[in-house]
């Protein structure tokens, strides 16, 4: 864990994050996907996150949970 924290601190010093904020397009896509794929309350946050990323033109997604995002058919999924 100590090595992972060191790596994160180094990475944080080199990378400036871009904070993404939902806009009307992201919210509309989120609601559309919830209806289109008949998703329930357990999929609210994953779907909201996917819609936000899609609205901000993110097309490649690194995730350890590819099944959470494959359904949308909107991303190139990269796993680790």
Image (spheres, rainbow, N blue to C red):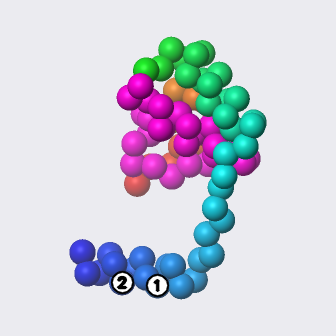
Q: Quadrant of the C terminus?
A: bottom left
Local secondary structure at mark 1: helix
46 is within the stretch colored magenta: yes
Q: Residues within 10 Å of mark 2 (few under 14, many from 20)?
A: few
Q: Which mark is residue 69?
A: none
Residue segment shown in magenta:
41-68
Q: Are marks 2 and 1 in contact (CB under 8 Å)?
A: yes
Identify the image quadrant of residue 14.
Answer: bottom right
Single out the residue that lies furthest toward the left.
1
Residue 12 in the image: x percent, y percent?
A: 51, 79
- In the rendered view, would you say 75 is above or below 36? below
Magenta region, main secondary structure: helix
Local secondary structure at mark 2: helix
The front one of 22 and 50 is 22
- In the rendered view, would you say 15 is above or below 57? below
Residue 69 in the image: x percent, y percent?
A: 50, 35
Please give the residue where the numbered disc 2 appears in the rendered image: 6
Residue 16 in the image: x percent, y percent?
A: 62, 75
Residue at 64% x, 61% y is: 19
Residue 70 seen in the current view: no
Going by the image, does 23 lie left or right of 38? right
Q: Which mark is residue 10?
A: 1
Identify the image quadrant of residue 36.
Answer: top right
């Amino acid at each position: 864990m100590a090595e992972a924290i060191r790596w994160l601190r180094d990475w944080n010093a080199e990378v400036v994050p871009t904070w993404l904020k939902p806009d009307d397009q992201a919210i509309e896509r989120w609601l559309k996907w919830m209806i289109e794929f008949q998703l329930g309350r357990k999929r609210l946050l994953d779907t909201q996150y996917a819609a936000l990323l899609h609205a901000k033109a993110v097309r490649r997604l690194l995730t350890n949970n590819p099944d959470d995002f494959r359904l949308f058919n909107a991303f190139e999924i990269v796993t680790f």
